[in-house]
Image (cartoon, rainbow, N blue to C red):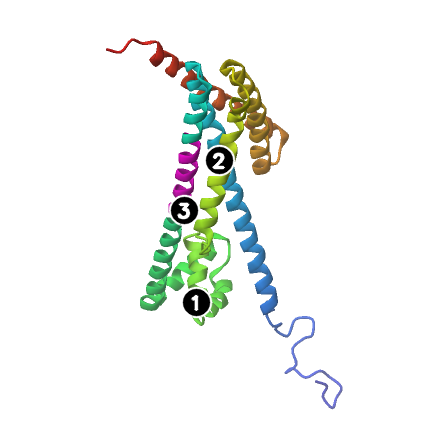
Amino acid sequence: MISASGAKSELEPPSEIWRAPQPVPVPSKHTTIRATIHSEWQNNHSDITRDIIIGFADGLTVPFALTAGISSLGSSKLVVTAGLSELFSGAISMGLGAYLAAVTERDHYLSEEKREQEEIRCTPDEEKEEVYDIMYSYGVSRAATKPLVDALAANSEQWVRFMMDFELKLEKPKVSRAWISAVTMGLAYFIGGIIPMIPYFIMKNVTYALFVSIGITAVILLCFGFVKNYITIRTRRSGAYGAVQTLVVGVLAAATSYGIVRAIDGRKWV
């Protein structure tokens, strides 16, 4: 403001110091929805990948070790019968196990969510202090955190979500997660287990079928181990390590099973 004498009024703050407060940008509804969808897609993708890896790895190793062991008895029909029995029962077991694990995870989340809701309702001041502590661990000062605390206090639903994400570090499972996990892991186990058995279906000589099965399984174990580690760590060295590691585990399992069956079959039981 300019006075009649032409001098600036003392009531006007210097322009180089004073700045009008800028409004904090609030994400639009569409932006929030897009971020939520992207986050859910990433979580679902990683969960499905994990189920495939676990199911395929077990399916490729366990039935292969079993059929390799039973092949020492010299009966192709026995190998196929026992292998298929284990394959179906193993796939069902893996699927049910994945389903129960997902249900337990969902129940645990709901239980913790209910507990957080009660704490926010009964002891809001203590929960506010927890928010301050959480943000302080990220290097955010108490003064800078206060607007966040006030915003969360005005929206109990988002407050609960914040505590679940940052305090307990729990992700809310989808309702369909249990069935998807069960089907994915069961199918992955079945596909992984049927591959080593293919030679026994088309070859009458059990010894030849065993060697072909070993060759096929060894190649798949190497490829699977490489891809599994490469997807996780993104380096060729880790992929090579995973390939060798997976192959060694498969060979040891098959050799152990083969040796045990031979030892039991060669012993004279009274």
Camera-nearest residue between 57 and 81: 81
Residue 62 visible somewhere in the drawing: no
Which picture quadrant has residue 258? top left
Closer to the camera: disc 3 or disc 1? 3
Mark 3 belongs to which amino acid?
A: Tyr
**Residue found at the far right of this picture:** 6
Residue wearing tag 1: 157
Q: Answer with mark 3 or mark 1, whichever residue precedes in sequence.
A: 3
Kind of element beneath mark 3: helix
Kind of element beneath mark 1: helix
What label does residue 99 carry, if any?
Answer: 3
Task: Name which residue lies at 39% across and 38% down.
Answer: 93
Image x and y of residue 224, in percent: 57, 31
Image x and y of residue 73, in percent: 41, 14
What is the distance, in whole Å, between disc 3 and disc 1 at their CAs? 28 Å
What label does residue 142 carry, if any?
Answer: none
Task: Name which residue lies at 41% across and 26% down.
Answer: 82
Residue 80, compared with residue 159, is above or below; it is above
| Quarter in which the C terminus is drawn | top left
Q: Answer with mark 3 or mark 2, whichever residue precedes in sequence.
A: 3
Task: Name which residue lies at 54% across and 15% down.
Answer: 208
Magenta span contains residue 228: no
Camera-nearest residue between 17 and 62: 62
Magenta span contains residue 88: yes
Residue wearing tag 2: 190
Closer to the camera: disc 3 or disc 2? 2
Kind of element beneath mark 2: helix
Image x and y of residue 95, in percent: 42, 42
Q: Is disc 2 surrounded by few (<14), some (14 to 19) or many (20+) residues within 10 Å?
A: many
Camera-nearest residue between 26 and 99: 99
Q: Which residues are magenta?
A: 86-102
